Amino acid sequence: MKAVILAGGRGSRLRPLTDVVPKPMIEVHGKPVMQYVVEGLVAAKITDIAVALCYLPEAVEGYFGDGAAFGARMRYFVESAPLGTAGAVKAAEEFLDEPFVVASADAFTDMDFSALCERHIRGGLPVTIAVAKADDVSQLGAVKVSGGKVVTLTEKSGVKESGLVSMGIYCLDPSVLSLIPPGQKYDFAKDLFPRLLGKMGAYLTDCRWCDVGTPQSLAQASAASLS
C-alpha cells in the first residue's frame, strides 16, 4: 500500500493562526498535527507517501523533508491552484500504481490504518471509506451503510442527529483515478463518491478521531490524548 496525505488546505477557519502557519503544521501536544498521520501510516508499514500541497508548501517540505527521519519515503506534489480533494490525488497519479490510502493532514487520530487496508482488500470494492459514530452529524459527511456498503452520503446537512460520518480517510484502487478529470477542481465527497454509491465499502471504527479544522476542534484535540 501507498498513501496520499492531503495537506494543501488554507485553513481559513483557523485564522489568524493559519496566516503564517499552514494547517498541517499547527501543533497538537508539541508536534504538527500532520505528524500523527505520518506516524500512523508508518506504524501500518505504509511508508511510500505522497503529500499534496498548495498553501505555504515550503513549511511542510522543510519540516518533513524526504521523510527518512520519520521512517517514510515522501514525495511532494504542489498545486498552483487548489484542485479539491480528488483533484489533488489525481495530480499524484504517476505515483499511485497500487492500492492506496488517502488521509487529511489535519486528522488527529489513532486509527489502525492496516485494519482499514485489510478491510479494503477483503471487500473487493474500488473504494473503502472509514466511518465512525457521531452524536451530531450536522456539520460532517453523514453516511448510511447497508450490507457493508455506503448507500448515501450527505455533506453538512445541518440536521442535528446521531449517525455515521465519513472520517475523510479512504482506501482506493488506482482504477478509480480514471474517473477524476485532470487539472480540474474535483472533490471526493461532492463529485466522485455520489457516482459510486453502492460500490463503496464502509470500514466502521471506534478509534479516536478529530478533524482539526476549527478553533473548537483544535481545542478538543489539544485536550485529547492518543497515548
Image (cartoon, rainbow, N blue to C red):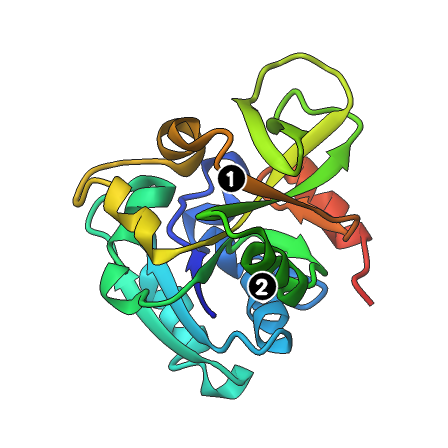
Tag nearer the camera, 1 or 2: 1
The residue that appears at 58% across and 63% down in the rendered structure is 37
In the image, taking residue 77 as reference, residue 106 lies left or right, namely: right
CA gap between label 1 and label 2 equals: 23 Å
Q: Is the residue 200 above or below the residue 113 in the image?
A: above
Residue 162 in percent (x, y) is at 78, 23
Q: Looking at the image, how many numbered discs can be counted on the residues?
A: 2
Residue that badge 1 annotates: 200
Q: In the picture, residue 157 is in which quadrant? A: top right
Residue that badge 2 annotates: 37
Residue 53 in percent (x, y) is at 33, 57
Determine crowd level at label 1: few under 14, some 14-19, many 20+ residues with C-alpha closer than 10 A: many
Asked whether 62 or 111 is in front, the reply is 111
Q: Is the residue 84 above or below the residue 64 in the image?
A: above
Residue 140 in percent (x, y) is at 61, 29
The residue that appears at 79% across and 62% down in the rendered structure is 226
Q: Secondary structure at mark 1?
A: strand
Asked whether 216 or 19 is in front, the reply is 216
Determine crowd level at label 2: few under 14, some 14-19, many 20+ residues with C-alpha closer than 10 A: many
In the image, taking residue 78 as reference, residue 7 lies left or right, namely: right
Q: In the image, what residue type sits under mark 1?
A: Met
Q: In the picture, residue 118 is in which quadrant? A: bottom right
